[in-house]
Image (cartoon, helix red, strand yellow):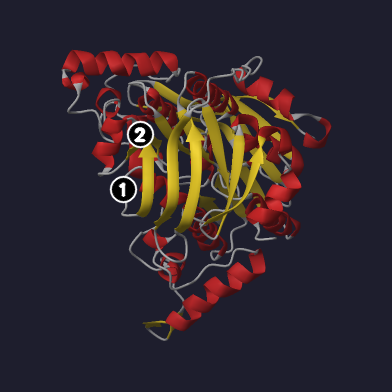
Amino acid sequence: MHGVGKTYPGDVVAVRDVDLELRAGEIVAICGENGAGKTTLATMAARILTPTTGTIEGTTRVGFVHQHFELIDRMRVWENVALGNEPRRGLRLDRAAARERVRALGNANGMDVDPDAVVETLPVGIAQRVEILRELAREPEVLLLDEPTAVLAPSEIDALFATLRALAARGIAIAIVTHKLQEVIAHAHRAVVMRAGAIVAHFDDVATTSAQEIARAMVGGEIPALAAHAPTALVPRLIVRDLCAGDDASGLRSATFAVRAGEIVGFAGVEGNGQTALADALGGVIPHRGTIELDGAELGGGPRARIAAGVRTIAQDRRREALVLPWSIVDNAVLGDERGPVFARSARRARAKEIVERFDVRTKSLDTAVDALSGGNQQKVVVGRTLANDPKVVIAYQPTRGIDVGAAALVASRLIEARNGGVAVLLVSFELDELFALSDRILVLFRGEIVGEFARDAFDRARIGALMAGAA
């Protein structure tokens, strides 16, 4: 890429004057804050987006794995992988060959997926595998991945990078847009840092640098420290007994636990072990058996009743479950509260302004459609809305998924501040580092059951990891 830039109508500059080489056999990390231009740069490299200025040379066999899945939900896995790249027997689609291709690619790359599964029934982490397998089926010479590990468990991340290293060893050039700097240090050969659309730093030998040095380049200074865990009066707030929800494969089975006011309880587990059923049952989204008590009273009803009672959720998929993308920041800021006192236009704008200021949402206007915001800024809107209006319980499902280190630190601090203010927080995360940093206790889920509990002073990475994998 030589002098590549992208300007949108209204003189909005997304990328400016970038020179970048992707070399055969090398893994390059593209780092930067949300809105820095990383995804725009990657989509231009993949020739999905046309640059306004500059030139791109080299192969056209470029695969692109999107952060927000580009799959057809109602089609099966093998149909998504085959789409546009269909194996044929004469003039007919060879369905058996298409299924076998998925199996073979999954086995070869440590990402087994049922070829006949319907995509909309898959957990987010499995859908991510389908995205990657679809691109590998096209035998790319360059593979670009946008936040590929955002929803993967530690063992899945290890398997993915083993695959990427094997692909690089075969001569494929690989570039990863990522916020996970420990992954950059562990797996990348080179790293570049973008800020305000331009590359502002090169790290030509990642092995000789540190995550802190890359983070400072990303934000242009020091990363803000997390808010401190302040002691609070711990009294039972949410009590769950014998909770069952969801299907047999990925549901929740007879979970009993309590979360106290002023406590963050983290739920560790490989995705698909009951986390989604837990969050949806507590949020009133799906039917359940068992009892849920809030401040001593049984909690019932659907999502609106739960919101009215003070139970708020940071959904795992902000674009599909938490935001109405064409709507403005103002209108998204009050979703779920439309019947409350913020229904008046002036009150809605005041709520939106408070969220934008408190969570540093980067936008030119409160009337901007949230679809025009970067992923991290979208997440700040969701978290800000969740923590507004004094919730009693917050279900935080992957609250820092796919956002940069600065934004993640801000979101984490706001959750700790809510905890310090007496909110009961349930934290579902597939990143052990996040669970260890924020949780007062950790419960481990395996096949829908709670199989372990750890107090903060007894966190044990090896033991928790073993329980996540089903070891007794």
Residue 256 in picture, x, y percent from top left:
49, 49
| Residue at the far bottom in the pictured view | 90
Task: State which quadrant residue 184 falls in.
Answer: top right
Mark 1 and mark 2 lie on one chain; the one further toward the N terminus is 1
Task: Tell me if 440 is positioned left or right of 318 in this view.
Answer: right
Q: Residues within 10 Å of mark 2 (few under 14, many from 20)?
A: many
Name the mark on residue 460.
none
Q: Residues within 10 Å of mark 1 (few under 14, many from 20)?
A: some
| Residue at the far right in the pictured view | 208
Residue 236 in picture, x, y percent from top left:
47, 32
Q: Is residue 176 above or below residue 214?
A: below
Residue at image coords 24%, 37%: 304
Q: Secondary structure at mark 2?
A: strand
Verify CB contact (< 8 Å) between mark 1 and mark 2.
no
Task: Tell me if 230 is positioned left or right of 339 in this view.
Answer: right
* Amino acid type, mark 1: Val
**Which residue was labeled with disc 2?**
311
The quarter of the rendered structure image containing the N terminus is: top right
